[in-house]
Image (cartoon, grey):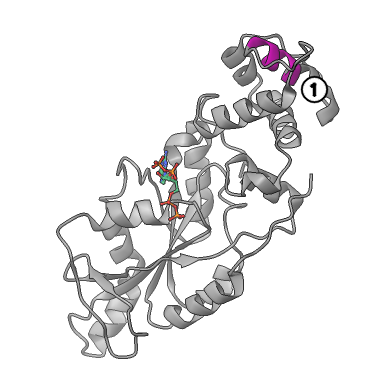
Amino acid sequence: MNVQWYPGHMAKAKRMMQENIKLIDVVIELVDARIPISSKNPDIDSLAANKSRVILLNKYDMADPKYNDLWKSYFDDKGYYTALINSKSGEGVKEIKDIVYKACQEKLERDRRKGIKNRPIRAMIVGIPNVGKSTFINSFVGRATAKTGNKPGVTKGKQWIRLSSKIELLDTPGILWPKFEDPAAGMRLAFIGSINDNIIQMTELALELILFLNKYYPDAIKKRYDIEVPQEMEVIKDCIGTLEQIALKRSCLMKGGEADIERAAKIVLDDFRNVRLGRITLEFP
Ligand code: G4P
C-alpha cells in the first residue's frame, strides 16, 4: 500500500522552523512511541545541527511496554537525552526539566566560562502533526508560568514561556512532516491515524493491520472479536476472511445479508487507535 499525502503547508512550516531554530539552544523532539522512526522527520537532524537534542517518546501508554525501554535505549545509545512520556496524563513530564538541563550542561558550562550568567536555556518543541505537541506543552508548562513577551531578534508575536529561571520555551511548536518515501512508514502513520482517513483506503489499511497483527500480536484480533484466525497469512488477501468474520460478529451486514467489510475495517482501525486491541508497537528497534 502506497499512501500518498498532500503536504499542505510543509514548505512554510519548514521555513518558520529554520527561522526559529536560530534562537534555540535545545530542540525537544516528540516522536510516537509506537512508531519512533516513522514518526521522525530526518530533516530535523540537519535543522538542529549543533543544538542539544532531547527525544521524547510520547504516547508510551499506547505502545507495547516490552519495546518501550528498547526504543529508549536505542535513542540513548545514539547520544540523545530521552524519556518515555504520556503527555495526556502527565506521566514522565515533570522530569523533563531536569533532562533539558542535563542536555544543555555543556552549553551552560561554556556560558559560565564566558562570564554569561543567568541566561535561560531556550527550548523549542518539534514533531509531526498529531504526535502530541500541544498536549505536551500544556502539561509541561502547567499553570504557574508567565509569558515573557517579545524579545529582540524574535519575529513579532513570538512568545516565550518561562518554565523556570533557567528554561524558556517557545510557545509555538515546530511542525515537521514525516517522510513518505518509505511506503511502510506511510502505512504505520496511517494505522495510528496521522493521515487523514479520507485519502486512504480504509479496507486495505485494516487488512494490512490484520496482517501485521497476525504476525506480531497473534492474539489481539482473536481476543477482541472472539473469532478464529488462520495462522498462515502471507498477503492482505488472506485477511479478507478475518475481516468478514469481524463484520458478522459485529452485525455489519449489507442489504443481502453479506458481510460489510468496509464497516468492519473502520471498527478494527478505531479499536486499534483507541488501544482496544491492546498496547501495540508497530516497529521494532
Ligand atoms: P499535535 O499538537 O502534535 O498535533 O497533537 P495534540 O497535542 O493535538 O495531540 C493529538 C492527540 O493525541 C490528542 O487526542 C491528544 O489527547 C493525544 N495525546 C497526546 N499525547 C498523548 C499521550 O501521551 N497519550 C495518549 N494516550 N494520548 C495522547 P485527540 O483524540 O485529538 O483528542 P482527545 O482524545 O484528547 O480529546
Q: Secondary structure at mark 1?
A: helix
Mark 1 and ligand 1: say if the CB distance to the nearest ligand atom is below 8 Å. no
Q: Which residues are magenta?
A: 243-249
> Which residue matches tag 1?
240
On screen, residue 219 versus residue 150, left or right, reads right
* Residue sitting at x 60%, y 26%: 267
Tell me the quarter of the image containing the C terminus.
Answer: top right
Q: Quadrant of residue 169?
A: bottom left
On screen, residue 279 versus residue 41, left or right, reads left
Where is residue 144 drawn, in percent x and y? 14, 59
The reply to whether the magenta stretch includes residue 67 is no
Say which amino acid is labelled 1. Answer: Ile
Label 1 CA crowd tier, 10 Å (few <14, some 14–19, many 20+): some
Q: How many marks?
A: 1
Where is residue 179 drawn, in percent x and y? 66, 60
* Residue sitting at x 52%, y 45%: 71
On screen, residue 47 versus residue 202, left or right, reads left
Position above or below: 19 against 222: below
Foreground of the two, 251 or 164: 251
Tell me the quarter of the image containing the N terminus.
Answer: top right
Foreground of the two, 257 or 219: 257
Where is residue 53 drawn, in percent x and y? 44, 66
